[in-house]
Image: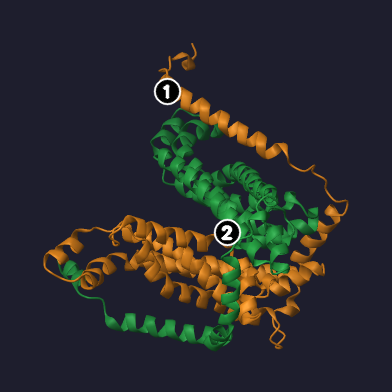
Amino acid sequence: MKIVDVQKPKTPVKQRLIRWGSVSIFVLICIWAFASMPNIEIKDTAAETSRAIIDGILHPDWAYVYTGDGEDLTFLMIETLAIAFLGTFISIVFCIPFSIWAAKNIVRWKIFSGAGKVVLSLVRTIPELVMALLFVKVVGPGAFCGVLALGLHSIGMLGKLNSEEIEKIDMGPVEAMSAAGSNRMKSFWFAVVPQVVPQFLSLALYRFEINVRSATILGIAGAGGIGAPMIFAMHGRDWDRVGIILLGIIIMVTLIDFISGRIRRKLV
Amino acid sequence: MEQQIAALKKPRKTKHLLTVVLLLILFYASSYNTKAYIEDLISGLPNMQSILVKMASPDWSYFEPIITPVLDTIRMAFIGTLLGAILSIPVAFLAANNLFGKWVTIPARFILNIIRAIPELLIAALFVAIFGMGMIPGILAIAFFSMGIISKLLYESIETIDPGPLEAMTAVGSKKLVWIRFAVIPQVLASFTSYVLYTFEINVRAAAILGYVGAGGIGINYERVMGFLEYQKLSTIVFAMFVVVVIIDWISTKLRERLV
């Protein structure tokens, strides 16, 4: 006797329809996505190049770590970190009014907070790299333009997350304070702020982790940090240089994630 | 009781003060390092203004030429996410400590951490060097990166599943694969789907810049437009991507709400 022969309960028709419907929609999207794919043509040099890359990564250019002329890995890594830190700092300060604006339980009219959300998502839509290119035109190439690009882009993201955090709070204390006759400013300060500060800081730290990653590539747009030497090394097929930079990025990002993760666990 | 009273007492102020001082030092040091002078920004404001004025009037005639690249971007994100999701399943199982021993999970996690530490654009640039320009390196970069994210989220949720079914199946002596199929997968399927959708949302945004290093999609147009300083066209692209991202986020959020 097989155990499998136990009769299974039948799924209701509606559920089955939904299931088959979603499967067929998924298949249709797959067909659409794969249908107009370009032919996969791998360059003849692909194997050779990948071997060269792997070889370069396995034998990093250790001399580049520190040369003392301000163009070395250590210096540029510190610059990258500084860009990420300052960018996050700016966005933390400036996202506060935006997150209040976009929170629908603080603002009286829903349209108003909806507009705030739209503004924030418009800001988020412009990629950091494009923002960096825009700021290159404003302040000239250099680390400062990376700071501004990260700062502005992060306002979009942090503002959105923070406004959602504000929307989640318990409105009891706010009502109690206004019932006791406090003005809006005071009830905001004493009833809303204490409830959101830990999450707020945790999100900011998380954003810092993301910004460290972003700061490593902004150099491609001329915005300082390790990105520019990285892309130059790639164009020059200088794979051992690429290897050491990649190693540096991996170590820095992992370290920052570890530290920030520790602090975040303490916060929440 | 004493502990409760201690918890009610205000935390010591020196700690907060030290944190603030440390942050200010870091703030000052990094502004010094990045040469962030507010004067530069102020003197650049007229430029900023002229860019914004141009961006405020999008060039709608540029809308048609970018339809294909925008669709390509979505395609890249879709295929990349799909590949990444498939790849992430075995990796996530290997990294979950209630399924495998330390000797398997620690190396698996180590590799995952490394994957997540490399920015996508760099992976894409490496793949462009290997495979040449086009969508293929973009798709591979997205797949690689998605695998990192989905595996991490998935193994964390595998670790929180109910051990009951696992024990029951071990007790009747099932094989590892059957064990995973009937005791693990049913418990994590919903959250897996939700993570894949979430990663897809991220990937649509990420795919938008991959073209900048030659990996296909709308990024190529971003680069071209910025190269010629055509800000009207830039805002057309931004607008188009905004519409796409809003629609995809909306669909994905609705689907995720139903799943959980």
x 43%, y 14%: residue: A7
- Furthest residue toward top: A1
For the residue pair A92 and A85, the one nearer the viewer reads as A92
Color of chain A here? orange
For the residue pair B159 and B223, the one nearer the viewer reads as B223
- The residue that mark 2 highlights is B113
Helix, strand, or loop for circle 2?
helix
Amino acid type of the residue tagged 2 in the rendering: Asn
x 49%, y 11%: residue: A1
Color of chain B here? green
x 26%, y 66%: residue: A192
Q: Chain of mark 1?
A: A
- The residue that mark 1 highlights is A14
Q: Provide residue A92's location: percent of width, then percent of height.
A: 43, 72
Q: CB under 8 Å between callouts 1 and 2?
A: no
In this rendering, is residue B148 above or below B172?
below
Amino acid type of the residue tagged 1 in the rendering: Lys
Q: Residues within 10 Å of mark 2 (few under 14, many from 20)?
A: some
Tell me the quadrant of the picture where the N terminus of chain B can be found.
bottom left
Please indicate whether residue B191 sits to the left or right of residue B222 in the image: left
Colouring method of the image: by chain
Tell me the quadrant of the picture where the C terminus of chain B can be found.
top left
